Image: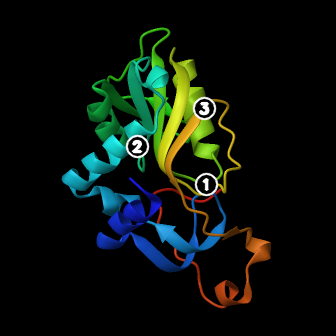
Amino acid sequence: MTEQEVLAEFRASKALLEGHFLLSSGRHSAHYLQCARVLMNPERAGRLAVALAATLPHDVRKQIDKVVSPAMGGVIIGQEMGRALQVDAMFVERPTGTFELRRGFELDPGDRVLLVEDVITTGKSSREAITAIEEAGGKVIAAASLVDRSAGTVDLGVPYFPLVAINFPTYAPDELPPELAATPAIKPGSRVAT
């Protein structure tokens, strides 16, 4: 799937938003990718997951024992990646502020895990999820996401395979361009900015 085809999927589902947004990373942007909207159609979610799985090198794909994704944003694409790779999929969540496996999810010691996200901007949530997976006995061998918003700068400590890199600029609160500073920020994500 090309970058234009991926963006067409976002536009068709009205998931590419424009305005002033406060991202969960704490940065601001004039664009927001609402992955929950693009993934709400199971057929589209499946196509995107198959395309994302195809970005993984064969030697990585054949090693994966489990897919783990962070709740909330990564749950749907993580489930679809499990289907595409024919392995179990589960998620970590933050009931008390720190990611952990719950709901009876368990990793066997040494399970080789693919971490799957919807969008990665700074990688903070991904790194926190990797820590939780390792504390639960898994070994994260790679990470994948639908969208890399880091401009290629994110370092997760493991090989990283995004479906597409979309480099809409993001800004620290004290770096806002005048057109963003003039409008209130909308917080469309699923967690509080830090």
Q: Secondary structure at mark 3?
A: loop
- Crowd class of label 3 (few under 14; some 14 to 19; many from 20; radius 10 Å): some
Select label 2 or label 1 by which is in front: 2
Measured as percent of width and height from the top left, residue 139 is found at 54, 18
Residue furthest right as drawn? 174
Question: In the rendered structure, which amino acid carries the disc numbered 2?
Answer: Leu
Q: In the picture, residue 160 is in which quadrant?
A: top right
- The residue sitting at 67% across, 31% down in the picture is 157
In the rendered view, would you say 194 is above or below 13? above
Measured from the top left, where is residue 34 in percent x and y? 41, 64
Q: Residues within 10 Å of mark 2 (few under 14, many from 20)?
A: many
Q: What is the quadrant of residue 156 in the picture?
A: top right
- Residue 164 x %, y %: 50, 54
Disc 2: which residue: 52
Q: Position of residue 143 (x, y in %)?
A: 53, 35
Residue for point 57% across, 59% down: 24
- 19 on left or right of 75: right
Mark closer to the chain start, 3 or 1: 1
How many C-alpha atoms fall within 10 Å of the one at disc 1: few (<14), some, or many (≥20)? many
Which label is found at residue 72? none
Q: Nearer the viewer, residue 17 or 12?
A: 12
Which residue is labeled 1 in the image?
121
Q: Secondary structure at mark 2?
A: helix
Q: Residue at x 37, y 62 (%)?
A: 5
Q: Distance from label 2 to label 1 (Cα)?
A: 17 Å
Q: Amino acid at mark 3?
A: Pro
Check disc 1 and give the amino acid type: Thr
Q: Give the residue number, with chain letter if any, for mark 3.
A: 159
Residue at image position (64%, 45%) is 124
Question: In the shown orientation, is residue 126 left or right of residue 42?
Answer: right
Q: Are marks 3 and 1 in contact (CB under 8 Å)?
A: no
